[in-house]
Amino acid sequence: MTGEDGWVDLARTRRLAVTTAVVALLVAPVVVNTDGWFPLSTYPMYSSTRGVETTFVTAQGLTGDGNQRDLTPSLIGGSDDPLLVVGELRAVLAAGRGDERCAEIASRVSSRDDYGDVTAIEVVAERHDNVARTRGDDDSLVNREVRARCEVER
């Protein structure tokens, strides 16, 4: 290939090769299981279906009259990031140290005047129906298991 036509053909061939490579990289995660290998990922945390129920691990305050009171992430885990707090709480429970974390939470709650009505802390695993919870139904709770309980000392 010589002359101007040769350069035009070469440029077209290069564009076609680059376009083919880009399309192949975009399609690869669908065709081949990349297991979330960046940048070739199907982002499975967003593309897979959820089960009917989900378990939430949290800590709740109990008032003197037995009502539950939600606690902030900073009271539960000393951070304002709920994902970090929940992940750490799960790890603490898996390590069998739920009573220690409960005591830490109770200590933080006892120093707050706006939580003066809270007399006890429960670290719980609550299983909820996803559809009912999304709708805001009060009856989304399927099961509630208390993993640790401690008193708030004042």
Image (cartoon, rainbow, N blue to C red):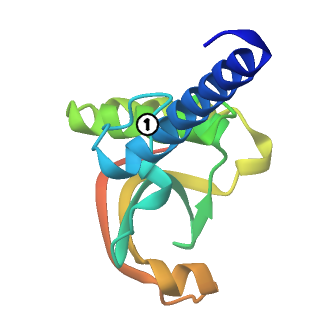
Q: How many marks?
A: 1
Residue, far top? 2
Vertical comparison of 124 with 81: above or below: below
The residue labelled by disc 1 is 87
Does residue 129 sit above or below 153 in this rendering?
below
* Rendering coords of residue 119 (x, y %): 55, 53
| Residue 50 placement (x, y as % from top left) | 38, 69
Quarter-of-image position of residue 23? top right
Q: Residue at x 31, y 38 (%)?
A: 35
Comparing 113 with 13, the one in front is: 13
Image quadrant where one finds the C terminus: top right
Q: Give the residue drawn at x 46%, y 59%.
A: 47
Whether residue 12 sits left or right of residue 105 in the image: it is: right
SS type, badge 1: helix
Residue 39 in view (yes/no): yes
Instruction: Answer whether residue 121 is visible to the viewer in this image.
Output: no
At 59% from the left and 79% from the top, the residue drawn is 134
- What residue is rendered at 39% in x and 29% in y? 37
Q: Position of residue 36 (x, y in %)?
A: 38, 36
The picture quadrant where one finds residue 8 is top right
- Quarter of the rendering occupied by the N terminus: top right
Horizontal side of residue 25 vs 99, given as left or right: right
Disc 1 crowd, CA 10 A, few/some/many (<14, 14-19, 20+) = few
Which amino acid, mark 1? Gly
Image position, residue 74 (x, y; %): 66, 35
Viewer-proximal residue among 73 and 146: 73
- Which residue is at the front of the view, 34 or 62? 34
